[in-house]
Amino acid sequence: MRVPQTQHRVEFENGVPRVWVDGFGDRFPEGLEVPRLLANGDSNTKTRKNVGYVSCGLSMSPHRSIGIGNVCTSASAGCVAGCLNDQGLASVFETIGYARKARTVLWYLERQWFLETLASDLERWQRKADRKGLELCARLNMFSDIQWERYGIPQGFPQVKFYDYTKHSKRAGELLPNYWVTFSRSETNHADCLNALKRGANVAVVFHDEGGKFVGNRSGRQRLPSSWRGFPVVDGDTTDLRFDDPRGKTRGRVVGLRLKAHDNATRAAIIESGFSVKVKR
Ligand code: SF4
């Protein structure tokens, strides 16, 4: 694996990595400690809706945002502009962004530590779920599109329900009995969306109503269409449990998501890019 030359640095102290992230000046703390990788799903705006499960997630820094590699190689310009990485709690608490950057550095510079720690974190979360008598679900690509099946992670935890969104067209659908992946539409992958739907995979599509008033908490007021390109639309905003979405054997479902943006300028840029689909009146 070739890693670009940067001044990012990792040092270990008693087995715990401390990470220096280059290029952010005073905006990144010196030697941030990263003892663990997975966060409680209840602490994330996306996954806190996962009622009935214990849920955990792995958040990294999307695309090429820290200049060390690309954690979502099939991203489009529109999805990078619309990525929710800096929205929700991350727009309030800077520490959330620090940890995402540090985890991304660790992914590239300390791969073995990363995979071992991810496995031990999953074991810890599984014990927590067992104590509560609930199933554990895990979303490992909160802001990335890493093919975890290539690293044996879902295979190593058959009792955990893994789920993700992806822009890699070949990953969409039931990758493994415990790994469900929803394909994600962008302005550049229209044919792949239709192919995925025709073979029974589900496809997430972002929709918007006209007008500029639907930012922040008001985004939930937008409508979803009942169908898109002849495929039924289900509301993907009521829960993040994508593996529980209706499935068709030969015809997939469209998982409708309302366009979320924290301000009018961002909303306008996302719409302009073609990433979001206008709901017809
Ligand atoms: S592929 Fe997903 S995580 Fe990556 S930039 Fe696009 S929306 Fe964000």
Image (cartoon, rainbow, N blue to C red):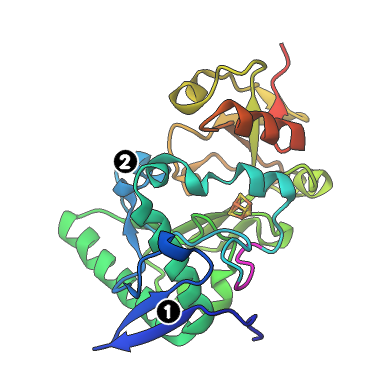
Farthest residue, direction top:
281
Q: Tell me the residue at 43%/25% (across/down).
A: 217
User: Is 198 located above or below residue 5 in the figure?
Assistant: above
Task: Please provide percent x and percent y for residue 84.
Answer: 53, 44
- Magenta stretch in the rendered image: 68-72
Q: Tell me the residue at 51%/83% (across/down).
A: 109
- Cα separation between marks 1 and 2: 28 Å
Residue situated in front as seen by the camera: 81 or 128:
81
User: Is 73 located above or below residue 80 in the figure?
Assistant: below
Task: Please provide percent x and percent y for residue 172.
Answer: 65, 56
Question: Neighbour class for label 2 at 10 Å: few (<14), some, many (≥20)?
Answer: few
Mark 2 or mark 1, which is nearer the start of the sequence?
2
Q: Nearer the viewer, mark 1 or mark 2?
A: 1
Q: Tell me the residue at 44%/45% (across/down).
A: 241
- Name the main secondary structure of what is drawn in magenta: loop
For residue 92, what is the image quadrant?
Answer: top left
User: Does 28 sit left or right of 36 as displayed?
Assistant: right
Q: Tag 1, which secondary structure?
A: helix
Amino acid found under the numbered disc labelled 1: Phe
User: Is 50 located above or below residue 176 in the figure?
Assistant: above
For residue 278, what is the image quadrant?
Answer: top right
Q: Is residue 12 magenta?
A: no
Q: Quadrant of the N terminus?
A: bottom right
User: Does 192 sit left or right of 73 as displayed?
Assistant: right
Task: Please provide percent x and percent y for residue 87.
Answer: 47, 41
Residue 187 seen anywhere in this rendered image of the structure: yes
Q: Tag 2, which secondary structure?
A: loop
Q: Quadrant of the C terminus?
A: top right
Query: Is the CB–ligand 1 distance for label 1 below 8 Å?
Result: no
